[in-house]
Image (cartoon, grey):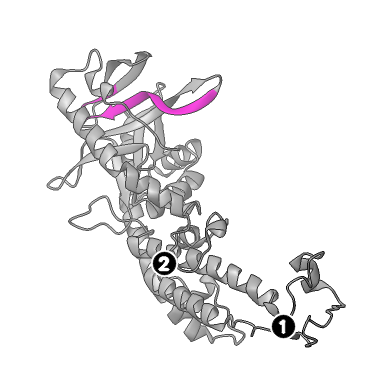
Amino acid sequence: MTVSIPYTVAAADGLREQDRPIVLGLLNNWSRHLRGNMLRNDYYEMNSMLKDLGISVPDSLKNLEVACGWGYKTVEVMRDHIAFDGFSMADGEDDEALRQIAKRNSLATRVGMAANSALKYCFTMWVVTDDGAGRARVSAYPPTLATGLWNDVTMRLDAGMFVVRFRRERGVATNEPDWVDVMLPDCLIRIREVTRGRWAAEYAPHALGVVPMFVMPYNPDDDRPFGTSRITPEVRWLIDCAVRENVNEEIASAFAASTQKYLLGTDGDAFEDTDRWSAFIGSILEVSLNSDGGTPTFGQLAQPSMQPLTDHFNNLCKRMSAATGIHVGQFGIMSDNPSSAEAMYAEQEPLILKCKSFIKEMKAALVRVCTAALATEYG
């Protein structure tokens, strides 16, 4: 679902003049990356369409449905290596409070979902708010529903925005939000749509002193503090190649199963009362002499080989393995000979290193999350 946040949010009634440029900057930041995020989601959901080269697929088969789950596997195989066990304190003093926060906010499940979004898009945005009863509410949002303004000096957000609710029509949620929250270091701004196209802002101060929105990135660097996606341009290109190869292989297999046959030396009316398919599959074929008394010649073309297509697909699997660090067997190449334990570990080592690096980023983000949650609980 493509989310659409209108720019009229920045013109909400009650929004302070000094805060309007901040809200506008958040909208620009979110809008600039939305298309790329939706593209990554299409490859994850296996919605990538055939990108034909125009030389091997007939027009009648260009709408052939072919799915390739490599985008999904690129994310899920890595996510399956990560598990959230809980929080702990060095002195154990606040362990029970942390356990209650984790239980109340279903963090065991939510952390897995957040890891999935970070791997798919590039980051997940954690948000800590007060639930109205003095308890911490911990939420997580993908980049399609949240954004922030990063400060390289403080290594945290100067401001953040996330979608709280969508407008409903006849009981069904649309792709248009009617409630957006903006976080600043000293307050939360609730911006709601009061009438169609008209928004109103309401301020709720907090005493945390920082924006309680925390980025959990995958593979960040100085140029990309919000991280990078596992579904990189290289991965998307290899998926396009695999989809195209699957279509070519499907067409080739159909030709291989129904090898072309021919008759030479007939008068042209040998199959006048019979369609070509019936003549092809018929067990008995009767053809009379032609008008010159000659005997028609029957033959068939050589069956095309599937080996070049299989070799090309195997090559794509190996290149996909190199691009993602995932064992080549996950992409379709299976070996009949089991590997030794040392060889299996060596094959998994690139993925293990990527998981360790991501877990380090996850821990750093979750420490900030639980610190803000405890501060909220203790006022």
Considering depth in this image, is 218 or 357 the residue closer to the camera?
218
* Residue 66 is at least partly visible in this image: no
Q: Position of residue 233 (x, y in %)?
A: 33, 61
Q: Which residue is mark 2?
A: 238
Q: Mark 1 vs mark 2: give the one in front.
A: 1
Q: Amino acid at mark 2?
A: Leu
Q: Position of residue 297 (x, y in %)?
A: 74, 86
- How far apart marks 1 and 2 lie (CA) works out to 48 Å
Assign a secondary structure to mark 2.
helix
The part of the image, by quadrant, that contains residue 215 is top left
Q: Is residue 174 above or below residue 52?
A: above
Q: Is residue 149 above or below residue 222?
A: above
Considering depth in this image, is 209 or 41 the residue closer to the camera?
41
Q: Residue at x 17, y 18 (%)?
A: 16
Residue 153 as seen in the image, left or right of residue 277: left
Q: Residue at x 23, y 52 (%)?
A: 225
Residue 309 as seen in the image, left or right of residue 202: right
Quarter of the image with the N terminus in it:
top left
Considering depth in this image, is 357 or 239 the residue closer to the camera?
239
Asked whether 183 falls inside the magenta stretch, the response is yes
Residue 201 as seen in the image, left or right of residue 93: left
Residue 265 is marked as 1
What is the count of numbered marks? Answer: 2
Q: Position of residue 12 (x, y in %)?
A: 25, 17
Q: Residue at x 31, y 21 (%)?
A: 190
Q: Which residues are magenta?
A: 172-189
Considering depth in this image, is 245 or 235 the residue closer to the camera?
245
The part of the image, by quadrant, that contains residue 38 is top left
First in sequence: mark 1 vs mark 2: 2
Q: Position of residue 368 (x, y in %)?
A: 30, 44
